[in-house]
Image: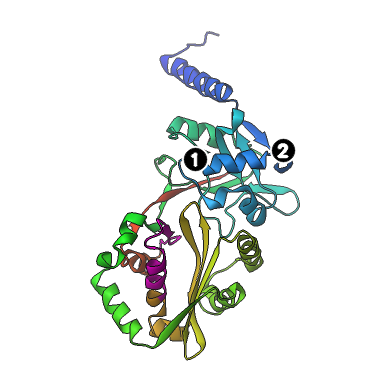
């Protein structure tokens, strides 16, 4: 029996060989948690094109204690793997709470071929792979787009001029409601407020992780908390983690009374007033929810989007 070797077969063989060669040249290695040089890792994150608190080793140790990594020589490219386990034997890559964007990090511009090489290097034993790629990763056709609104230092310097008409109107009303704001309030009280309001509609959130993050960030002096009060009652509050001149709004909560008093608008305006001359980027950590997106855009927020990579074997 004679087999014909077609042009398509030849091109496919070349493509497979090229991918294998590319992986070999890059020498992508998988490291278990205890094999990772975490000092070098954090240095690479800090010097990357998208330095993010989510990818720092101490942050990952809290949100995903069993995390692993894919790395190239000298950690020029690094890719955290947030490994989870269920039913004692089934392992998968999942998205941790309070960890918005991970993916591939490098101090140079990331090429789509390099990103695909890392994604294809994730071991097949993980039956499910869900990863929020970061904003510096090139877009992959077909992946779900996610929204994240930020305010850059340039915008913050003249922040109120960028407010929408509705935001200006709401702020004027809020300032007439006899609200006061206090910085440095206890994080536990803000987390409790969130759980009792917005948190009731959110499933599978491990608030012990957030409490632990707050403890670690407080020890590093990068935790910022604000509470809004009306007649001594806490009606709104926010938690921010700081890294590399960026404030991440990890939590924003308001009671029903706080919503009526427009306390969140009052709070964000006060935070912008505090940070506007410090060269700080304010990261709202979302959102794909239309009402929240309008709220963030109302302050002049711009969308710094990212993508969800998802692949299931079973």
Q: Nearer the viewer, residue 141 or 81?
A: 81
Residue name at image x 68 percent, y 37 percent: 31
Residue name at image x 29 percent, y 68 percent: 160
Q: Nearer the viewer, residue 146 or 128?
A: 146
Quadrant location of the N terminus in the rendered image: top right
Question: Helix, strand, or loop for circle 2?
Answer: helix
Say which label, 1 or 2, has the lower sequence index: 2
Instruction: Please check the rendered image and state whether residue 48 is part of the magenta-colored stretch, yes or no.
Output: no
Please give the label number shown on residue 48. 1
- Give me the C-alpha separation between circle 1 and circle 2: 21 Å
Instruction: Please check the rendered image and state whether residue 279 is part of the magenta-colored stretch, yes or no.
Output: yes
Residue numbers of the magenta segment: 267-288
Residue 167 relative to residue 37: left or right: left
Q: Position of residue 208 (x, y in %)?
A: 66, 67
The part of the image, by quadrant, that contains residue 27 is top right
Residue 274's place in the image compared with 9, above or below, is below
């Amino acid at each position: 029996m004679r087999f014909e070797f077609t042009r398509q077969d030849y091109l496919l063989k070349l493509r497979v060989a090229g991918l294998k060669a590319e992986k070999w040249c890059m020498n992508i290695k998988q490291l278990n948690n205890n094999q990772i040089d975490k000092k070098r890792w954090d240095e690479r994150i800090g010097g990357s094109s998208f330095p993010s608190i989510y990818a720092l080793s101490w942050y990952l140790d809290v949100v995903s204690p069993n995390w692993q990594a894919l790395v190239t020589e000298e950690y020029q490219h690094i890719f955290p793997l947030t490994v989870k386990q269920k039913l004692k034997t089934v392992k998968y890559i999942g998205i941790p709470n309070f960890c918005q964007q991970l993916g591939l990090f490098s101090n140079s511009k990331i090429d789509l071929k390099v990103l695909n090489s890392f994604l294809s290097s994730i071991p097949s034993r993980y039956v499910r792979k869900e990863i929020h790629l970061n904003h510096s990763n090139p877009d992959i056709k077909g992946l779900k787009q996610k929204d994240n609104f930020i305010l850059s230092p340039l915008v913050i310097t003249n922040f109120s001029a960028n407010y929408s008409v509705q935001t200006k109107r709401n702020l004027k009303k809020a300032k007439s409601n006899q609200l006061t704001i206090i910085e440095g309030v206890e994080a536990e009280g803000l987390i409790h407020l969130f759980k009792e309001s917005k948190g009731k509609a959110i499933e599978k959130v491990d608030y012990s992780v957030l409490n632990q993050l707050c403890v670690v960030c407080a020890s590093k002096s990068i935790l910022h908390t604000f509470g809004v009060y009306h007649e001594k009652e806490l009606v709104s509050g926010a938690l921010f983690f700081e890294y590399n001149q960026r404030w991440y709004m990890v939590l924003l909560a308001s009671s029903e009374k706080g919503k009526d008093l427009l306390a969140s608008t009052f709070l964000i305006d006060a935070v912008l007033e505090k940070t506007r001359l410090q060269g700080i980027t304010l990261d709202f950590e979302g959102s794909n929810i239309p009402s929240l997106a309008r709220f963030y855009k109302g302050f002049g927020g711009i969308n710094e989007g990212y993508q969800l990579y998802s692949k299931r074997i079973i």
